[in-house]
Image (cartoon, rainbow, N blue to C red):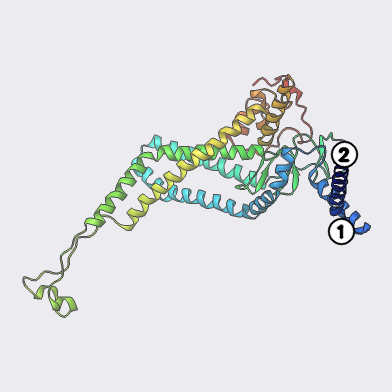
Amino acid sequence: MHSRRQVFSSVMRLFLRWFRLCPRRGRVRLPRRLRELWGYSRLLLKSLYFNTLTNSDVVMDCLFEPVFWMVDHLTRWFGVVFVCLVVVLTSSILFIAYFCLLPMVLHTYSTAWIVWHVCYGHWNLVMIVFHYYKATKTSPGHPPQMKTDVPAVSICKKCIIPKPARTHHCGICNTCILKMDHHCPWLNNCVGHFNHRYFFSFCLYMTLGCVYCSISGRNMFIDAYNAIEHFKSLDVEKQGVPVTGVGLLIGILPPGSMTGQSYYQTSPPPFTFRDKMFHKSIIYMWVLTSTVALALGGLTLWHAVLISRGETSIERHINGKETRRMQKKGKVFRNPFNYGRLNNWKVFFGVEKRSHWLTRVLLPSGHAPYGDGLTWDFYPHKKDMMAI
C-alpha cells in the first residue's frame, strides 16, 4: 500500500513537471535584436498616451483631434462663403427696404413718421456696415514672436512662443490671438483684443436693425400673407367660357361672324406679377429679420453678460473649471480681469469721459482699445477714477 502511494506520487510529480515544461518547449524564442525592437516599440506606444499629466481632457482631445482638424479646415475655407452670405442677405433686405417699402412710406406715412424711419434706419445701417467692415479687416492682435520682457503665463505648444495672459491659440488661423474670444466664421476672422468691440457692436446693431424691421413690418407681413392666400384662392377658382365653333378655333372666321356662338373670354386678373413679388418680398424680409433677431439677439445677450463679468468665451469655460477646483479646497476664485460691471463696459468701449458714450458708442469710432493686449493692469478703472 505504501509502495503504491510512492509510485502514484512520483508519477504525479513527473506529470506536473512535464506540464510546466511543455509551454516553454513549444514557445519560439525570438532573436535578441528583435526582442529589443519589440520592447522599444511597446514603450514608444505607451509613451504616446500615458504620462503623469494624463487625464480625461487629454484623452478626449486626442480622440477628437481628427474632428477638430476637419472643422478647422472647413471653417477656414468656408469663411469667405459665410462673409459673402452675410453681404448678400443684408443687401437683399436693403433692396426690399429701398425699392418696396420706402416709396410706400413716403406716400402713406405722416411727416413725423417718415423722418423717424429715415433717420433711424440710416443711422442703424451706417453702424452695421462700419462695425462689420472693421471687425473683418482689423487684426485681433498677436503676441510678439521675438523674446521680450512681457510676462508670459505659458508656452504655446504649436507656435512655440510665450503666451501672455488671456492669449490662446486659434487652430483655424494657426496663430496665437491676444485676448481671444472665439473664431467667427461670419467674419472670417478671430475675435480678439483689437476687434472685440467691433464684433460686439456689429451684433448689437444688427440685432437692433432686425428687431426694428420685424416690429415695424409686422402689420405689412400680415397683410402680405393674407394677400398671398387670396391670390392662391383666385388661382384655384379662376373660371372661363369654353371655345365653340371650328372657324373661331382655327382662326378663319372673325369673332363677330358667328351669331349666337360664344368664344373664350376671361376678365383680366385682379393682381399682377409685381403685386405677387411685392407681397412675397415683405414676407421674406419679415421672416429673415425675425429669425436673425432671435438668434443673434441671444448671442449678443450672452456676450453682454460675459463683458459685464470681464470674461471672454474661452475664459468663461476656464474660470468655471477653476471655480469648481477652488471650491473643493474651500477657497473662492476671483477673476483678476473683473473691474466691476460698469468699469468693464468702460474698458471694453474705451470710455474715458461722458461724451465718449456718444462719440465712441453711439457713433462710428475707430479708436484703439485700452492697452496693448499683453498686460492688464488697469488700476485707475479698478478704483473707479472716471466720474461718468
Q: What residue is disc 1 on?
A: 28
Q: Name, please, the residue furthest toward the left.
A: 260
Helix, strand, or loop for circle 2?
A: loop
The answer to which of marks 1 and 2 sits earlier in the sequence is 1
* Picture quarter with the N terminus: top right
Residue 24, horizontal then vertical, whole percent: 87, 53
Residue depicted at x 66% and y 50%: 67
Q: Residue 342 shows which numbered tag?
A: none
Q: What amino acid type should be assigned to the residue bearing mark 1?
A: Val
Please give the name of the residue rendered at 48% of the width and 40% of the height, measured from the top-left corner.
210
- Residue at image position (59%, 54%) is 81
Residue density around tag 1, few if under 14, some if 14–19, many if 20 or more, within 10 Å: few
For the residue pair 209 and 264, the one nearer the viewer reads as 264
What is the number of callouts on the image? 2
- 30 w.r.t. 152: above or below: below
Left or right: 360, with 256 as reference point:
right
Q: CA distance from mark 1 to mark 2?
A: 60 Å
Compared to residue 304, the image places residue 334 above or below, namely above
Q: Quadrant of residue 157?
A: top right
Screen quadrant of the C terminus: top right
Label 2 neighbour load within 10 Å: few <14, some 14-19, many 20+: few
The image quadrant of residue 191 is top right
> Which residue corresponds to mark 2?
148
